[in-house]
Amino acid sequence: MENGQQDRKEGWERELLEKLAFASLEESRKARRWGIFFKIFIAVYLIIVLLIMQSGTWGEKALASRYTALVDLDGEISAESNANADNIIQGLRDAFEAKAAVGVILQANSPGGSPVQSAYIYDEILRLREKYPDKPLYAVIGDVCASGCYYAVAAADKIYASPASIVGSIGVLMDGFGLWTA
């Protein structure tokens, strides 16, 4: 009788341990399933948000609804430099064409340079101001804006400079051989 009771006692403990082990295993499976579900849910959510932000104007509005575009004219204006007409004109076009840009600032710091390159920039500023009359263009001068630089920024709506900035010096000095004809 003692053996029968002992078998029952051992069987009961074993049965309880098996139930606890299986319950723990089932709980781990449920937790893992929920973890996988939430990871997939968050990944899909993030992908959808990124796709929406990249698609068209809603993404632009979400990141920055309105801003002022900045175009940098820095250094000598020449066909070989970074401050050539093609680079400056492309920057101006991008700034004016941006729907979220409410204005354009042309930050100028140049001793001048090629009159032809400067004329291209000047003409493009006039064309863009006519095409986008509601988008103002302000020139902000750093240390120097002389010669061709001043020629280029003269097409801006307003020009701002520090009292210590060197501004102006438009013109041509032509030296001759001293031959006078009458």
Image (cartoon, helix red, strand yellow):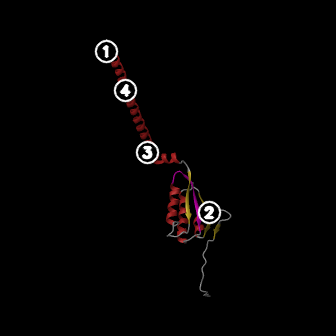
What amino acid is at disc 1? Answer: Asn
Residue for badge 2 = 141
Q: Earlier in the sequence, mark 2 or mark 1?
A: 1
Q: Which residue is mark 4?
A: 21
- Which class describes the residues within 10 Å of circle 1: few (<14), some (14-19), or many (20+)? few
Eyeballing the image, is 176 above or below 49? below
Nearer to us of marks 3 and 1 is 1
| Magenta stretch contains residue 106 | yes
Using the image, determine if residue 31 lies above or below residue 131.
above
Is there CB contact under 8 Å for labels 2 and 4? no
Question: Which residue in the rendered view is the most extreme toward the front?
Answer: 2
Element at badge 1? helix
Q: Amino acid at mark 3?
A: Leu
Q: Position of residue 12 (x, y in %)?
A: 35, 18
Q: CA distance from mark 2 to mark 1?
A: 103 Å
Q: Magenta stretch: give its range.
A: 98-110
Residue 93 belongs to magenta span: no
Q: Earlier in the sequence, mark 3 or mark 2?
A: 3
Cα–Cα span, label 4 and label 3: 45 Å
Query: What residue is drawn where x is 42% and y is 38%?
Result: 39
Mark 2 or 1, closer to the camera: 1
- Left or right? Give the position of 105 relative to 5: right
The residue indicated by pointer 1 is 3
Q: Are marks 3 and 1 in contact (CB under 8 Å)?
A: no
Q: Position of residue 102 (x, y in %)?
A: 56, 52
Instruction: State how far apart marks 2 and 4 are (Cα).
Output: 77 Å
Of the numbered discs 1 and 4, the one sitting upstream in the chain is 1
- Which secondary structure type mostly characterizes the magenta part of the structure? strand
Q: Position of residue 103 (x, y in %)?
A: 57, 55
Tag 2: residue type?
A: Ile
